[in-house]
Structure formats: structure tokens, C-alpha cells
Amino acid sequence: MSTTFQLDTSTSRANPTPQPMKRLTVPKIRAHKADGETREPLVMLTAYTARQAQLLDAHCDILLVGDSLAQVIYGLPTTIPVTLDMMANHAAAVVRGSYHSVVVVDMPFGSYEQSPQQAFESATFLLKQSGAAAVKLEGGEQMAETVAFLNQRGIPVMGHVGLTPQAVNVLGGYGARGRDDAEATKIVGDAQALDKAGAFAIVLEGVLEPIAIEATKTVSCPTIGIGASAQCDGQVLVTEDMLGMFDRVPRFVKKYEDIAGVIERTVVKYAEEVRARSFPTSDQTYQPKG
Ligand SMILES: Nc1nc(=O)c2c([nH]1)NC[C@@H]1CN(c3ccc(C(=O)N[C@@H](CCC(=O)O)C(=O)O)cc3)CN21
Ligand SMILES: CC(C)C(=O)C(=O)O
Ligand SMILES: [Mg+2]
């Protein structure tokens, strides 16, 4: 693990505005449904870069620096090779680009499963390097002790149950979870165990709607769904999936735009103009004064 701590995360917010929006806090997220009122769903999206964070920040409650950067940024087949340094660097960029949302960082595979102590060491590295507010880790009941250990020592934790992509080699793929009763019961129990351990929110990924309903009804913290129906207390998607920038997207994604198409059409235009010498024109050219 790297021991250099060079980033000044207290300054250089990239979004200085005349009346800056106040940054949301983890306790506000945790208390989202505490009084039993029906609340507006929480809005969460992934972000991996400063500019992306700038564009999303004002419209979201939570920005997740997801380990899905493996596929989306690095062209890796799974999230398994992701390192703490990769997560810390992208998280620092996202924090620099945000001033409103709570920034949450995924703990990468292998950085937290061994013991609460290992998880604490990894989480402190991520938070010190980036200035993010909280970490997310995958797993249910077996991670509850770790969630409590971190939370009691100043590190808020978001849980993640159901389809947990870091366990792809155990699960055997990315199919929906909870199709048999035993697994459905286990997923609900996992969410409840994380809630009792003090998780401030729980991602429910790739689970059948009845599981999302039961988990959401029986935990005190908000549930945030991805492929888990509209019955959750919030929703998350991978930003590039939603924008139509990523080539292979799960069924639960709604493609709101075709940004890949916009990019391709624009590059074709640029290439044609360069080859025809119609770009650059005098507007894009420096001439001597005089
Ligand atoms: N771009 C991206 N979007 C994601 O949602 C995402 C990532 N990357 N990387 C990390 C995990 C992996 N996730 C995935 C990846 C693939 C499927 C998928 O292909 N699902 C198929 C069903 C597969 C099966 O039945 O075996 C689908 O059609 O939904 C789902 C979730 C969710 N996460
Ligand atoms: C899909 C979300 C929940 C995630 O964990 C990620 O982007 O890595
Ligand atoms: Mg993830």
C-alpha cells in the first residue's frame, strides 16, 4: 500500500459558485425515511472524473466512485483487478469536482474481506487520499461486524447486497439474484444485518421486486436499487450506461441518450475536415500581430 499522502483535499473545489449549495451529510441520508413519511427517492449516480462530478453533482444526492470503473474506464472484464490506488485517485478527482453530493467510494475486491482491521486500514487510505465521506463494500451478514467496526471508528459504510459483482466467480455470472426462496430470504436477512450494524444506506442490486419490497420495508436505512424495482428508497445507475456511452449494458439500464453516437458522429466530422483541410480555419489560427 502506498504511504505517500500528497493530496490537499481541503481546497480547490472545482465548483466555486456565488451561493454554493450546502454539502449533504451522511446522517441526513441515513435519516431519509426515519420519520416514516413518504420521501422523494434518493438520486445516486456513479462518477469517476472531476468533470463528470461537476456535471452531475448539483442534481444528485450521492455520487458513487464505483469499482465499475474497471469495465467502464479501464476495459477490464470484471471488478476483481481494481486496486486501492485506482479507487483513491478517481475518488480524489470526483471530490474536487463536487460540492453538494455525498461522495462514496467502493472498497475494491481484496481490500476489506479479511478482517475488520484490514477494512479499516483500506478505508482510511481511501478517505485520506480522496476527501470522500464514506465507503461502500459488498456482502451481507458476513460483513456486518466490519460495518460496525468502521462505523464506530468514524467511517460511514454503505452496504451492497444481492448481485455483488466482486463475487462473480462464486455466483457464476451477473444474473438476477433471489430466484429461489432460500436465496431470497438470505438477501433480506443480509440487508437487515447491515442495517443493524449501522450501514447508512444499502444498495440492492439485481434482485426480484418482492425482495426489494421486503428489504426496504424492514430496514431503517434507505435502500438504493439498481435492477431492484421502483420500490427502493433511491436509485443508482452507472452514468455511462444511462448516457449510452458503454457498449454492453445490463437489462435494468435505461439508456436516456446516445452519447456514443454523438461522439462517433463528431469524430467522423472532425476527421473529414482535417483530411479536407477545412479545419482549422483562420478563426482557429494564430497570426502575427501587425
Ligand atoms: N457499466 C457497468 N454497469 C453496471 O451496472 C455494472 C458495471 N459496469 N460493472 C460492475 C457491475 C457489474 N454489473 C453487471 C454486469 C453485467 C450484467 C448483465 O450482463 N446482466 C445480464 C444478465 C446476465 C445473466 O443473466 O447472466 C442482463 O441482461 O441484464 C449485470 C450487471 C453491474 N455493474
Ligand atoms: C453499480 C454500483 C452500485 C456499483 O457498485 C459500481 O458502480 O461499482
Ligand atoms: Mg461497485
Image: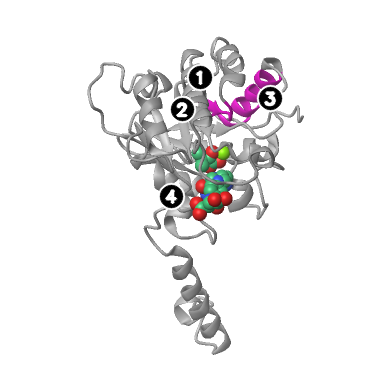
Q: CA distance from mark 4 to mark 3?
A: 28 Å
From the viewer's perspective, is 230 left or right of 146?
A: left
User: Do tag 3 and tag 1 residues touch (Cβ < 8 Å)?
Assistant: no
Q: Label 4 belongs to which residue?
A: 252
The kind of secondary structure element at disc 2 is: strand
Mark found first going from the N terminus, 4 or 3: 3
Q: Is residue 133 magenta?
A: yes
Which labelled disc corresponds to residue 113?
3
Q: CA distance from mark 2 to mark 3?
A: 17 Å
Tell me which residue sits at (69%, 41%) in the image: 169
CA neighbours of label 4 inside 10 A, class few (<14), some (14 to 19), many (20+): few
Q: Amino acid at mark 3?
A: Glu
Q: Label 2 belongs to which residue?
A: 202
Which labelled disc corresponds to residue 194?
1
Q: Is residue 7 magenta?
A: no
Q: Amino acid at mark 2?
A: Ile
From the viewer's perspective, is 239 left or right of 171?
A: left
121 and 141: which is toward the camera: 141
The kind of secondary structure element at disc 4 is: loop
User: Do tag 2 and tag 4 residues touch (Cβ < 8 Å)?
Assistant: no
Which residues are the magenta region? 118-139
